[in-house]
Image (cartoon, grey):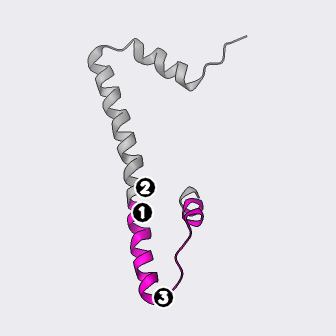
Amino acid sequence: MEKQYSWDELIMDNIQVLPDRDKKEVLNFIEYLKIKENQSFIDYVNRRTEKAVEDRQRGTKFSSLGELQNEYGS
């Protein structure tokens, strides 16, 4: 029966055999993914902030933190 590997094990096993130059490239790619993910959240916060300012000017209610978290998660 073939052993099932976790994603972490597969990633680590494959990275360990790379030359240092390629390991650095892997780290750079990981940083890119983190920034990309963070940028998505920043864009969301900026859109919601603009909407909140518009809602306040119209006198409509603010969204609760729970509502915002649910919206972002979907």
- The residue tagged with tag 3: helix, strand or loop? loop
Of all residues shown, which one is farthest toward the bottom? 58
Give the label on residue 45, or none: 1
Q: Is residue 21 above or below residue 44?
A: above
Q: What's the residue at 38%, 34% (across, down)?
A: 30
Q: Position of residue 55 (x, y in %)?
A: 46, 82
Sequence-first disc among 2 and 3? 2
Give the label on residue 64, or none: none
Please give the residue where the numbered disc 3 appears in the rendered image: 59
- The residue tagged with tag 1: helix, strand or loop? helix
Q: Position of residue 2 (x, y in %)?
A: 68, 12
Quadrant of the rendering where the N terminus is positioned = top right
| Circle 2: residue type | Phe
Give the label on residue 41, or none: 2
| Circle 1: residue type | Val
Span highlighted in magenta in the image:
43-71
